[in-house]
Image (cartoon, grey):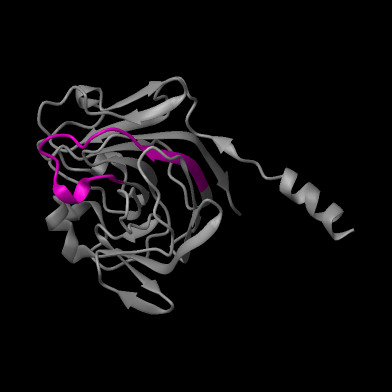
Amino acid sequence: MALAAAAPAAAAEDWRPIFNGRDLSGWIPKVNHRPLGENWRDTFRVDDGVLRVSYDRYEVFKDEFAHLIYRTPLSSYRLRFEYRFVGPQTPGAPAWAVRNSGVMLHGQAPETMSLDQSFPVSVEAQLLGGAPGETRPTGNVCTPGVTISIAGAPRREHCLSSASPTYPEGEWVRFEAEVRGGRLVRHRINGEVVMEYTDVRLAPAEYAQLGADPSAFPAEAAPLESGYISLQGEGHPIEFRRIEVLELP
């Protein structure tokens, strides 16, 4: 009886695709040093139902960190997709960016980003891939322009590692974020919770290092309760597919 009762609830989950598998409708690119909406060197493109972050039209990467921003802000929701790293890193990209990408949660409004802003103020679910024999968890958390707490304690580190295994380049990995305003965020990798944090707040002292305009934000360390999702490009090719959202009450 318990199993029978649970089945309708699972079926009622209203997951909604936010990537149509054909083009970039509903998304807007922002590449560092380029104006909002310019898809510089076709960094973001769609092939065979897959959203690709590609660098085959770059001779040298010149600090051109890129974000593809979903146009609709969200507050409480679940986000899920699959991703994999493919091919070599782009010449000129930083060493730390090898098999390194992410999805930005609760990001600032795209129109408030500065021309020379490297990353949106947001909380990042960091996606990493490992080389053979390397220990490199994925589903980590990084904090460009924000602070978080873990187990009730404020954390000041820029990035914190998750409890996930390491996944190699070329392997599709399932990621999910459960976001409940700024109160609670969970990261899941292949169905397992690997990171949980609370109390997401703005960190005004960090805006300058991102190139962010302080006038776009409250002056105080306000709670970050909503914002924009964006997929990141840091110089290593990556692919995304099956991108869906389930809005929560």
On screen, 116 above or below 77?
Answer: above
Side (left or right) of 189 relative to 53: right
Residue farthest toward the right in the current orientation of the protein: 1
Most foreground residue, 234 or 18: 234
State whether residue 2 appears in this view: yes
Whole-percent x, y for residue 31 in the image: 21, 35
Residue 181 versus residue 79 in the image, above or below: below
- Camera-nearest residue between 45 and 207: 45
Residue 91 in the image, given as x and y percentages of width and height: 12, 35
The residue depicted at 30 percent of the width and 41 percent of the height is 232
Residue 82 lies within the magenta run:
yes
Classify 238 as above or below 74. above
Using the image as rendered, state which of residue 27 and residue 225 is in the foreground: 27
Residue 245, given in percent of the width and then of the height, sits at 53, 42
Location of residue 230 in the rendering, given as x and y in whole percent from the top left corner:
35, 42
What residue is at 56 percent from the left and 53 percent from the top? 191
Number of disc labels: 0
- Start-end of magenta stretch: 79-100
Quadrant of the image for the C terminus? bottom right
Asked whether the viewer can see residue 212, the reply is: no
Place residue 246 in its image quadrant: top right
In front here: 13 or 138?
Answer: 138
**Which quarter of the rendered picture does the N terminus lie within?**
bottom right
Q: Residue furthest front?
A: 133
Q: Quadrant of residue 39?
A: top left
Q: Is residue 212 above or below residue 159?
A: above
Q: Is residue 76 magenta?
A: no
